[in-house]
Amino acid sequence: MSERPALQLRDRAVKALKDDQMRQAVRNAVDRLSGNKEKAARELPHWEQWREQTRLIRQHTIDNLDYYLKMLTDNVRKAGGQVHFALTAEAARGIITGLCQQYEAKLVVKSKSMVTEEIHLNPALEKAGMEVVESDLAEYILQLAGETPSHIIVPAIHKNRYQIADLFSQVAGEKVESDTPALTRFARQTLREKFMEADIGITGCNFAVAETGSVTLVTNEGNARLSTALPRVVISVMGMERLVPAFEDLETVLSMLPRSATGQKLTSYISVINGPRQAADIDGCEKFHLVIVDNGRSRILADEEYRQSLNCIRCGACFNVCPVYRQIGGHAYGSVYGGPIGSVITPLLENDFAFWGELPYASTLCAACTSTCPAKIPLQELLLKLRAHRVSAGYTNTFEKIAFGLWKRFFKLPGTYKFAMKAASLGQKPLVKNGYITARIPLLANWTNSRYLPAAADETFRDRWKKRKKQVSP
Amino acid sequence: MKASIFITCICDSMYPQVGDSMVRVLEKLGVTLDFPPEQTCCGQPALSSGYWEDAKPVAETMLTAFKNSEYVVAPAGSCITAIKEYYPALFEQNPDQYRQAKELIGKIYEFSEFVVKILKKEDVGASFPHRVTYHSSCHARRFLNTDEYILALLKNVREIDYVPLPHEEACCGFGGTFAVKLPEISEAMVDEKVRNIFETKADVLIGTDLSCLMNITGRLRKQKSNIRVMHMAELLDEGMRT
Ligand code: SF4
């Protein structure tokens, strides 16, 4: 289980809303990304059919996960790799740290992995005395800044390039210009040396292929390739659900992933690791390990409806269209996974509805996420189900419970409903000015801080209707 | 043609004039209306907040009220969405209620949808010489697909100067209890919506969902803007009188 943030969701959000620089950076980026995605979707004929195909592949895999995991394991082993299962984050950290120690690693390079964030791997390796270097530009930036990703595809989305140039300048001991080529050049030079020296490369896994026992990684910088080709030992870490049955399924998912994520037709690099190097190979690692992480996923798998959340291909498109993410950025979610999908899977992965059960309320249920998701995950339905789950588990506040209890009593019968409407219309009288309630009223104070609430009319529609009927038919 | 009106609790208590407009327009178009008095609220606030047990008895008022109706028309897309999205699951344990819920879903229409789809009227003979922009609610856009009906109706209003709203797809930030639970995020969202509305330089904002309109008007007024905010039914009602 990961640590809970000190603040509640609302306080985290308030803090984020005060960070104008972050909000501007996020707004600019999501507008660009979702615009590109829209364009990419229009350019690919039959987008809806591709989505359906993606959903089918994912659903089939998840419904038969045990079967395909076994197939994957057998085939990785056949290719000379070793496979490890980790039931918890702690177990995963233990396995990976143990492997690194076994190979006497001093320097570890890492590339592209949300799941290692999920299991908080870096601090564990550092505690065991190793130097860990993030090799992707964005992750490297965050490592220097001592921060965590705030988006699953664009981890440093919350930073602008001036902030990045400042960070790099500190490392370089001289001024690094803030244009993209200069930043990339600096990172590349610094990181290339690390690749040459590294003993172990740790990567994530976009999709493993059960049928061939391969691990595929898609990147734009190509660092995954260096992380896997140069060091002697490669450890790939994957969430238990991150696989497809066959190589041909990659055509679909690797078409949809970059298009949904950034609007690219393909990413610049697709690396496929098929076990350690064989006699005839000219490069590749000597040892290959695949660590498959459960960490709550079997629990999600056990629920027929929540199971769909495992269909996620981690494209981040739902973040980019979410009006809530747009305003508060990723860190305010407080969890490794933010955005709509993060709000769904965090309470489930953490198995914690008391604290993390707040996250499903970080949505207006506008369904922008559902309509964009390439795997057609009904995100807003799952958010709703999680809310109901939290209420029935008894974790909501007493005040709200009482309010809905009262609401039910008054609204379930036309007579009491009419009475409540009348009472509201009379009771509000002292608070009304020019047709609006501008004073603070306890229940709605939060809302009325920034908006005027219209006053209830003197006469409800139903009363007017009654009168009207009397006039028409005396 | 006969239809029953579902007035929704927000319309009933805060915007009865919208109900009046809807009645006038529909009657002019030859519909005979009735108002089943058993109706109260669709239950959406409780449903979307996770209080399904509390929502059930309230939602039952809907089933009873419209049992014998041929068509049901409402001035609020989000309430219709709630019925369509939640009722089947809410009533799944009781076959009788489940059937009634399905029946209701099959005959309930958002106002503009009813006019265009059922009455087959795109031109109601209205004229409205103002600069108008349209906030497409999430329900209209992503659940009910009723934007096309609104746009068809607007296209035929004489003298109207219609300007599309930038970021039309963006939620206004209301989301029922969302606006109360996370008011600061909600404010940031409605603020962006209002900025976009200002950009259009429109004099009138229209919509088909009273909760979104209430949220947006609240923000506009707080900012001392007096842009008129109207329900589509009010626009047509006014336009048909001139
Ligand atoms: S939930 Fe859907 S849209 Fe969001 S990251 Fe996963 S696949 Fe992409």
Image: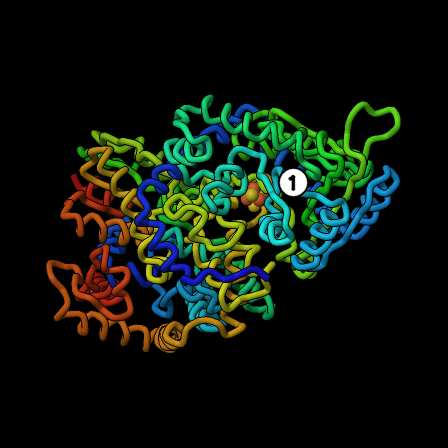
Q: Considering the image in quadrants, where does the C terminus of chain A appear?
A: bottom left
Residue under pointer 1: A107
- Quadrant in the rendering for residue B203: top left
Residue A110 located left or right of residue A371:
right
Residue B173 located left or right of residue A75:
left
Residue B26 visible here = no
- List x then y, in percent, for residue A105: 70, 43
Helix, strand or loop at label 1? It is strand
**Is residue A58 or residue A435 the one in the foreground?**
A58
- List x then y, in percent, for residue A45: 59, 25
- Quadrant in the rendering for residue A462: bottom left
- List x then y, in percent, for residue A81: 82, 41
Q: Amino acid at mark 1?
A: Leu
- Quadrant in the rendering for residue B239: top left
Q: Number of marks in the image?
A: 1
Q: Considering the image in quadrants, where does the N terminus of chain A appear?
A: bottom right
Q: Chain of mark 1?
A: A
